[in-house]
Image (cartoon, helix red, strand yellow):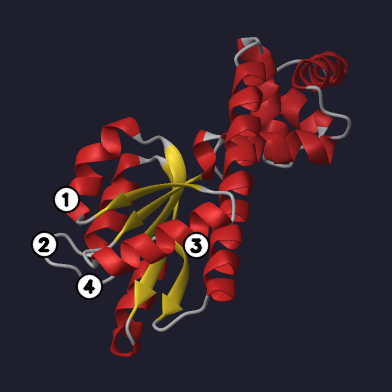
Amino acid sequence: MIDRVVHVVDDDQAVRESLTFMLTAAGFAVAAYESGEDFAAAMDDIETGCLITDVRMPGMSGLDLLRLVKASGKLITAIVVTGHGDVPLAVEAMKLGAVEFLEKPYDEKSLLAAVQAARARHDRVRDVEKERTAIGARIRTLSRRETEVLQRLVDGLQNKEIARDLGISPRTVEVYRANVMGKMQAASLSELVRMALLANGD
């Protein structure tokens, strides 16, 4: 699967080979790059996956790569590898979206646990994005008035308040509300509100 690819970026050939062997043995497909620039050049063809990068490298650093990934909007979860004195940089990497950081020297168990954590984050984000897309499609089926009712329900207004706000009867609000619940495939008001908030990125 393409989203099981682990992209290893390290200027040290021995490290790249060691990580490639370890990850391949664990069942992952691996793409290795000897510089940040090489990974950046391949970014157009990468949509998803896990990135393992050293923090300190000649040219583009690990932080530079994280900024690039963040700006791309692509679903790539990252793990940064750091020396003992680079912990402040690792913290900065976490702020840029890294899922984990590993201090050298690290063992196979720690590395694979970090990759699994990155994979779990990847799956959660992917599932949320799929749900957001589906919800957005449902919202687009609502009429203008249904959308207005939905917005007010999310704001916490009661039927009578919505009726007064829109200049319609409470009974008409109930009809629109039922239509919204049906089109949005919401079993309850709380689920409807959650959907609307997710669609808005909240």
Closer to us: 87 or 7: 7
Where is residue 48 drawn, in percent x and y? Answer: 45, 39
- Mark 3 vs mark 1, foreground winner is 3
Give amino acid for label 4. Answer: Arg
Task: Identify residue for label 2.
Answer: 59
- Label 4 and label 3: CA atoms lie apart by 22 Å
State whether residue 150 appears in this view: yes
Number of other residues with Cα within 10 Å of mark 2, as a class: few under 14, some 14 to 19, many 20 or more: few
**Residue appearing at x 41%, y 69% in the figure:** 94
Number of other residues with Cα within 10 Å of mark 4, as a class: few under 14, some 14 to 19, many 20 or more: some
Mark toward the start of the polypeptide (2 vs 3)? 3
- Label 2 and label 3: CA atoms lie apart by 26 Å
Q: In which quarter of the image is residue 79?
A: bottom left
Mark toward the start of the polypeptide (2 vs 1)? 1
Closer to us: 193 or 65: 65
The answer to whether mark 2 and mark 1 are in CB contact below 8 A is yes
- Mark 2 vs mark 3, foreground winner is 3
Give amino acid for label 3. Answer: Met
Please, what secondary structure does the residue beneath circle 2 have? Answer: loop
Task: Identify residue for label 1.
Answer: 37
Closer to us: 44 or 70: 44
- Label 4 and label 2: CA atoms lie apart by 9 Å
- Image position of 2 (left or right of 69): right
Task: Identify residue for label 3.
Answer: 22
Mark toward the start of the polypeptide (4 vs 3)? 3
Mark toward the start of the polypeptide (4 vs 1)? 1
- Label 3 and label 1: CA atoms lie apart by 24 Å
Where is residue 127 drawn, in percent x and y? Answer: 64, 38
The answer to whether mark 3 and mark 1 are in CB contact below 8 A is no
Q: Quadrant of residue 42?
A: top left
